[in-house]
Image (spheres, helix red, strand yellow):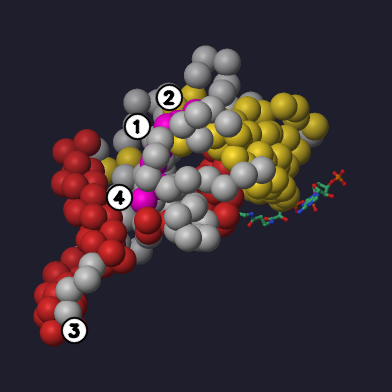
């Protein structure tokens, strides 16, 4: 894993900003595609235009998503991350912050693109947001690790289109195992999803870090 990290193209702010803008437009396009009511001919015409734009972007292709040059405090330097990545149109994106006492937190809103049961957030999407938040909380303890277990308790439906809060914190470290827990809450502060997870630092990653 660490080998792959060092080989990534690093994007400075000037390079990243227009690509983040591109991702934001594609994000809007995705929502428009899910909700559009245009007729068949217009849908085909737009699809052809999008295919042409896709080819323009493919003209210069990297081997892997680039990383962002960060200020050193942030852990979400993976621009292509599907939860936090500003370069990834499928990311909401969730802007996770870390407080001085190791709490990882963000406010975020999920659009209709993430619908599971009608008018509510897909449970897999909640799991993905929590996996990321708990993983970042685990990384606050030192090296961080790969998700070995992730247990979710869906207490009540999570609403779409309103501000949600995700919070996570590491609880303990036992050797290479890091335990963390967290929640997603609705705008009324009531918890909709609870999560606990164990992350394991791969042995080879510790060797690379020395
Ligand atoms: C790499 C670090 C970068 C971090 C940088 C931070 C970046 C900023 C934050 C990003 C946050 C991202 C958040 C998303 C994170 C993902 O999405 S990760 C992707 C999903 N997870 C995976 O694909 C993991 C796949 N599994 C594996 O790679 C390996 O099985 C693992 C988990 C690394 C463990 O492998 P291993 O080191 O060979 O483990 P092993 O020596 O067999 O076992 C060690 C101990 O853990 C226990 N254990 C291992 N696996 C399990 C399990 N699944 N269940 C229960 N116990 C287990 C063993 O029983 C053993 O316990 P003890 O006998 O010591 O008591």
Real-space Cα separation, disc 3 to disc 2, in angstroms: 49 Å
Q: Which residue is label 1 attached to?
A: 70
Quadrant where the C terminus sits is top right
- Compare marks 1 and 3 and give the one earlier in the sequence: 3
Picture quarter containing residue 170?
A: top right
Q: Is 192 situated left or right of 173 in this image?
A: left
Real-space Cα separation, disc 2 to disc 1, in angstroms: 7 Å
Q: Which residues are magenta?
A: 105-111
Percent coordinates x, y for residue 35 in the rendering: 28, 64
The residue at 35%/63% (across/down) is: 63
Q: Residue pushed farthest right?
A: 174
**151 w.r.t. 75: above or below:** below
The residue at 49%/53% (across/down) is: 120
The residue at 18%/66% (across/down) is: 57
Q: Which residue is label 4 attached to?
A: 87
- Of 90 and 147, the residue lying toward us: 90
- Compare marks 1 and 4 and give the one earlier in the sequence: 1
- Where disc 2 sits, the SS reads loop
Picture quarter containing residue 145?
A: top right
Q: Which residue is label 2 attached to?
A: 73
- Where disc 1 sits, the SS reads loop
- Compare marks 3 and 2 and give the one earlier in the sequence: 3
Q: Are marks 2 and 1 in contact (CB under 8 Å)?
A: yes
Q: Which residue is label 3 attached to?
A: 40
Number of on-image labels: 4
- Tell me the mark number nearer the camera, choosing from 3 and 2: 3
- Tell me the mark number nearer the camera, choosing from 1 and 3: 3
């Amino acid at each position: 894993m660490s080998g792959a990290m060092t080989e990534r193209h690093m994007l400075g702010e000037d390079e990243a900003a227009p690509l983040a803008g591109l991702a934001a437009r594609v994000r809007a396009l995705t929502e428009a595609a899910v909700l559009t009511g245009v007729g068949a001919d217009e849908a085909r015409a737009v699809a052809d235009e999008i295919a042409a734009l896709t080819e323009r972007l493919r003209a210069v292709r990297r081997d892997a998503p680039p990383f962002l040059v960060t200020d050193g405090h942030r852990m979400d330097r993976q621009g292509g991350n599907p939860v936090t990545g500003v370069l990834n149109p499928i990311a909401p994106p969730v802007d996770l912050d870390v407080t001085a006492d190791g709490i990882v937190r963000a406010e975020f809103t999920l659009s209709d693109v993430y619908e599971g049961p009608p008018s509510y957030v897909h449970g897999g999407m909640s799991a993905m947001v929590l996996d990321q938040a708990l993983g970042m909380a685990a990384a606050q303890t030192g090296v961080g690790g790969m998700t070995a277990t992730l247990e979710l308790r869906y207490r009540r439906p999570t609403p779409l289109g309103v501000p949600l809060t995700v919070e996570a914190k590491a609880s303990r470290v036992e050797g290479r195992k890091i335990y963390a827990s967290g929640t997603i809450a609705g705008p009324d502060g009531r918890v909709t999803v609870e999560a606990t997870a164990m992350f394991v630092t791969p042995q080879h990653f510790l060797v690379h870090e020395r």
